[in-house]
Image (cartoon, grey):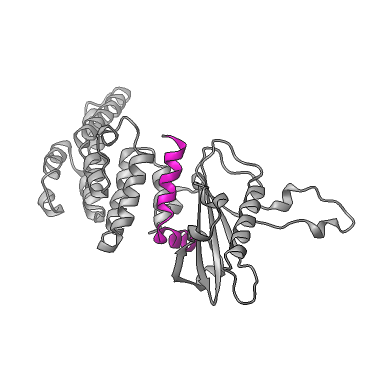
Amino acid sequence: MAKASHDHSYKLLFSEPEIIIDLLQGFVHEEWVNELDFSTLEKVSGSYVSDDLRGREDDVIWRVKYQQSWIYVYLLIEFQSTIDKFMAVRLMTYMGLLYQDLIKAKQLPADKLLPPVFPVVLYNGQQRWNAATELKDLIVSLPGGLEQYLPSLKYLILDEGSYKPSELIPLKNLVAAIFRLENSNSDDDILEVISSLIEWLSSPEQTRLRRSFSIWINRVLLRPSDELQQQKTEINDLVEIKTMLADRIPQWIREGEARGEARGEARGEARGEARGEARGEARGEAQTLLKLLKLKFIKLPEAIELQVNSADKQQLDVWVGRILTANSLDEIFS
């Protein structure tokens, strides 16, 4: 995946107001966020942003009312393989350009004071972010009063890889879903998050946001060898992406059974128990069945999970055979 395509897909997502709201409410735990009037949230128009900022494909600028004043949110999307030690210097430059443009375009309030800008860096590199988040930490400090003249700037770093699944899974939050998708290790992890997105973004007015997610998943998450990437036309619908990935169900079942057989054989040899292999097969098939059920029905009653985990292989085979055509849990387990 080329960096330009990756960055553009991210910029498309973070050009949706719902994403910015979830970012601020879910990941900025500060009191001022509670005072924002999100009905005023708007993307900063390119008509009064200079070419220096307009041409930056990695950045998105929003503004929102805090009481009677505007607050600007400057989001820099950083996908470098190496961490930029001087990120604070870059942000100081970009914020200076933004202020310059606001002055030139006469976008200041009556008192002519500059609006506050909240700088955020979104980073998804493999290495955890360790660069200074305050500009003063990059400047040599000298005694004798000179420190009072040092420029001051601090930014918020959102390091996607630093969040644990246990922190993200409980959140009904679109940005948390993005982080989970980025950190996913398998297709069934991706499918679980896509199922949640389909549930959250079901209303007609969220059609554009669903399409933005679909484009991002197509271009960023799916490997070049995936079926979706091999098609001539790009699928821009979450349900279709989920369906295409779910077509791998027979392969997952075979893989689950193979893993179960391997564990069962190893356990049977070690303990000398002939039934070790059968138990291993059943356990592997049970885990695969539960994944498929969660993919199709999203949420499962605890009783169903207990029923699946306690079933033998013969019963599991029956349920697996019903899952592709069933429209409800009753049709599978009746």
Q: Is residue 127 left or right of residue 111?
A: left
Image coordinates for residue 233, horizontal then vertical, percent: 25, 38
Q: Is residue 162 left or right of residue 153?
A: left
Front in this rendered view, residue 15 or 249? 15
In the rendered structure, which segment of residues is drawn in magenta?
2-26
Q: Is residue 20 magenta?
A: yes
Q: Residue at x 55, y 63 (%)?
A: 72
Q: Residue at x 44, y 49 (%)?
A: 11
Image coordinates for residue 252, horizontal then vertical, percent: 24, 34
Image coordinates for residue 125, horizontal then vertical, percent: 52, 40
In which quadrant of the rendered view does residue 173 lie?
bottom left
The N terminus lies in which quarter of the figure?
top left
The answer to whether residue 251 is visible is: yes
The answer to whether residue 290 is visible is: no
Q: Residue at x 12, y 52 (%)?
A: 327
Q: Main secondary structure of the magenta part?
A: helix
Front in this rendered view, residue 14 or 110? 110
